Image: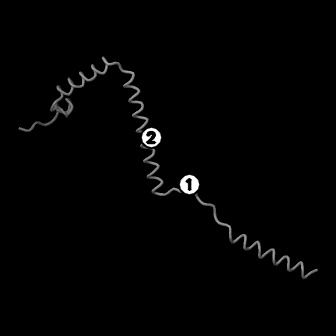
């Protein structure tokens, strides 16, 4: 009886040590790496850009043909009058002049 009890105990301890040795640590699915960070940033950039373009198209759809025409006319007029004036007026007024 004692011999069988000792034998069973030894066998069970041997089996449990094998089972413990085979346990693997859980895989880290969300481990942060440089590649993951770059991909994540790129995905966020694409998403923001698509949202921006959708909103811009929405605003353009709200404008009538006359509004678009007026905006284009005013833009061309502003570009014509500001030609060669890339510096704001207050900086041009107070800068040192070269003689």
As helix, strand or loop, the secondary structure at mark 2 comes to helix
Q: Quadrant of the N terminus?
A: bottom right
Q: Which residue is mark 2?
A: 47
Q: Label 1 neighbourhood size at 10 Å, few (<14), some (14-19), many (20+)?
A: few
Question: Mark 1 or mark 2, which is nearer the start of the sequence?
Answer: 1
5 up-or-down from 30: above or below: below
Residue at image point 16% right, 30% down: 83
The residues tagged by marks 2 and 1 sit, at their Cα atoms, a distance apart of 21 Å
Quadrant of the rendered image containing residue 60:
top left
Residue at x 40%, y 39% (from the top left corner): 49
Residue on which the image places disc 1? 30
Q: Quadrant of residue 96?
A: top left
Question: Residue 38: x and y, percent?
Answer: 43, 52
| Residue 11, horizontal then vertical, whole percent | 81, 77
Q: Residue at (54%, 57%) from the top-left corner?
A: 31
Q: Position of residue 91 (x, y in %)?
A: 20, 33
User: Seen in the image, is 91 located left or right of residue 37?
Assistant: left
Pinpoint residue 21: horizontal percent, then vertical percent. Answer: 69, 72
């Amino acid at each position: 009886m004692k011999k069988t009890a000792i034998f069973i105990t030894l066998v069970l301890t041997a089996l449990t040590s094998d089972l413990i040795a085979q346990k693997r640590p859980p895989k880290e699915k969300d481990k942060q790496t440089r590649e993951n960070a770059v991909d994540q940033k790129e995905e966020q950039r694409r998403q923001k850009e698509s949202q921006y373009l959708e909103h811009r198209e929405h605003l353009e759809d709200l404008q009538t043909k006359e509004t678009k025409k007026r905006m284009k006319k005013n833009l061309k007029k502003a570009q014509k009058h500001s030609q060669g004036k890339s510096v704001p007026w207050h900086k041009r007024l107070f800068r040192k002049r070269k003689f």
